[in-house]
Image: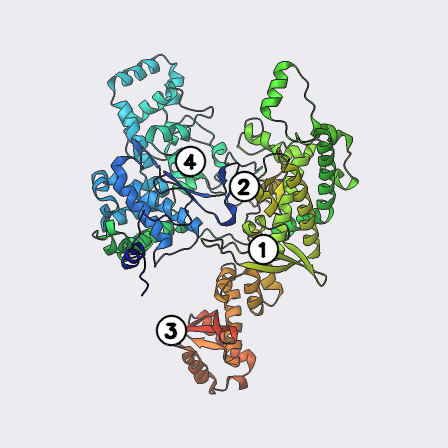
Amino acid sequence: MISLPKDLVEYLNNDNDQISLNVKPSWLINNFKDPIWWLKNANQTRLVNDKWRGAITIDWGMKLPQGRLTDMRWSKLLLHCQLIVIAHIECPQAATSNLKEVAKFQRTMLRISEYLIFNAPDQAELLGLSALSNHRVEMLLVDSLHGGICGTGSWCKRWDAFIQSIYSDLKTRGKVKHWASNLPSDERSKIDNWNREIISSDPKCLPGMPTPTTLSSEELIFARRWLKMENMLDRNGTVPLLTVADRIGVDRVRITKSKHLIYHLRPFEQCIDYRHQEQASNLCREKLSHRHKTIAQIATTHCSSSAQLNLYQGLSYLRRYVQYCDSLKDSQLHALNLERIPPELKGCGPKNRTPTLPVEVALFIYDHMIDWVLNLTIPLIDYYLEILGKVIKQQGNALRISKNMRAGCDALGIDMPDYWENAFSETPPPAELKRLGIWRVGPIFYEAINSPKKYRDAAGNSLLPSIIRNSGLTLIDAMLMNSAVIVAVTAAFSIRRIQELLNLHPSAVKITQGRNYLDFNLEKVGIDDTRSPACRPIPSFVGKALNKQNLLSRKLSDANKLRKHDPQIDKLLFIRPSNSAGTPLCYTFFRKYLDLYCDYIESPCDREGRRWYLQSHEPRRFGAMSFFHLCGMENSLPALTWFMGHGDISQTWHYIREELTGAEVTSIEVAMATSALLNQQVLGSVKGDKKLKDVLANHFGSDRLDLIDPNDLDQYLQYLHEEGVYTVTPHTIKTSNGEKHVIVINYSKEVTHA
């Protein structure tokens, strides 16, 4: 008999369900002991010049007032969090196989850890996650509901505590008092007046100034004077968030996301006009978005349902995974009674679903986009390629002039030639591009971001769109805008997600029997690059635009090989022009240039003067809703399910149902119920469809529905639906003959009267 190796026998005899840091999973690039984990992001992760790029990063070194989460004091808490995060993808009851979801879950675990550290530090140090109790979980959700990440991290309390610690220093207090006594009385009065009238972009005129709850009036006046004396206010009179982050011990990246903290800081500031704060500094929008919410609106309302649900789900997963972690088996986490949490704490506020554009807005934007793709895309790319060819011919292998090289030549008084502008001046644009008014090569977009004071008005809105409408586009800005338009138009006609298009392969477009098709991988991805391949038809003009974009990308890829080459460029259809000849078109650039395009064409505004900017998911939703209404409504659902890549027709129905009115839902569900009852393609719910058939038989005096007048049957079914007697949901079931679409009728309540 052949015996197995001893090590293998011991491994097989162990309880393999237990999560451990001793076995490194295939999805982790570096080591568990590293403060930052690098996770393989399917085929996006690769080595470029001995550096990993495209990996998903998980940072465990969360900053605290005294140290970081990776410090020895919190080693047990950190270990518990790491085990739970690994269990989220490795244990038998793992909730996901998507590493992006793992990174999202890890951020939830950091929030829980931060809450424990500031509300039960001694227990968090000794017990780790075992310090969680039913009471603490309930308070955690309450703090999240009212303050989001700022509430669970106690950021506002930490800032107030920092101010109180400065106030308690008698020497500093005397210094501030002496400084204020030397100020003119009117200036001192201005500094001390915290409850001032402010200017905001809020059309509803909500209170723009919060009332301090933890500081006395003396402490608040001291804080305003001290901040002014120490020059801790920016040119607008606001407290910089990065300064706050350093003072209270929060990571700079995390603190910029909290509108509650920004609102909390207003009594400490000297600012009057807060409109600049409403428009994000990394955006170049000419107007506020139609979805815009002011800081006061966000801070004075409950946290969104999606954010609250993420935290609640994280706690549910934590309870589930405890059994797979030896160090947590003896804790009471498995007994967390989440069902006792008040329903209003599990989620509150509007859903963050992307709504469908109003028809008139959508037609305006897509009319301009289709016109751009039909008339500008091909001549614009040809024009750029002509200039690129001249630059390569003149420059040879030195396609990019580095900043150091240019600075060195300037220091020596050497005039360095600008090959791009020279080639541009020698190449007049074709007649088709005259309306764009291209006047130089280099983008003005970067100048607008790096010099906000020069390119923003008093309200913080970008002046860039009006500049390019009056003076014309630069070549690079036009090219990047062109790429964004192609992606948005393709997304609408193929009903695809934006990320699926940004990851298209150069051979994605194919022509079969005179028709254009698009090959892509669905965005839903597992651990080992398990994106499912799919193919969908697209219009011929979209196929031509994609092929021309691919030609551009291949030229940029060839030029990029003259320098340090990223192999990922050879695998992507969308490559954008840059200083290094070519760089993958990322989601951030797509969003920014899509915003710029909406400003450029002056897309419609709402009654409050806020612009309809095309959001990343709106092209897919617009395409889906258009297909649904134009192709037979309920009869189009099977085809639309295939088009969208949904695994079940019920997913498509829920997706569509969110955008329908009550009357539309009733009409469609009545039509589905009628068709199902007459054709026997129906499954009953718990109470069964038989109950509905009995109600119809009693009402019409016959169980032969095919003998009933269709109008009478439709009218009565509509009445029953409006009364809430039943609802209808389509589903997909798998049979030996393949997939079959059926209707599930849920009988909800008895008929009270006819």
Q: Residue visible at 53% across and 80% down?
A: 679
Q: Which residue is mark 2?
A: 588
Question: Callout 2, which amino acid?
Answer: Thr
Per the rendering, the mark at residue 253 is 4
**Residue 2: x percent and y percent?**
33, 63
Which of disc 1 and disc 3 is earlier in sequence?
A: 1
Which of disc 4 and disc 2 is earlier in sequence?
A: 4
Q: Nearer the viewer, mark 4 or mark 1?
A: 1
Which of disc 2 and disc 3 is earlier in sequence?
A: 2
Q: Taking 161 as reference, is 312 above or below it?
A: below
| Gap between marks 4 and 3 measured at Cα | 52 Å
Question: Callout 1, which amino acid?
Answer: Phe
How is the model colour-coded?
Answer: rainbow
Looking at the image, which residue sits at the far top? 182
**Residue 452: x percent and y percent?**
54, 29
The answer to whether 90 appears left or right of 660 in the picture is left
Q: Which residue is mark 1?
A: 520
Q: Dividing the picture into quarters, in which one does residue 395 lie?
A: top right
Q: Nearer the viewer, residue 595 or 459?
A: 595
Secondary structure under badge 3? loop
| Gap between marks 3 and 1 measured at Cα | 46 Å
Q: Are marks 2 and 4 in contact (CB under 8 Å)?
A: no
**Residue 44: x percent and y percent?**
52, 46
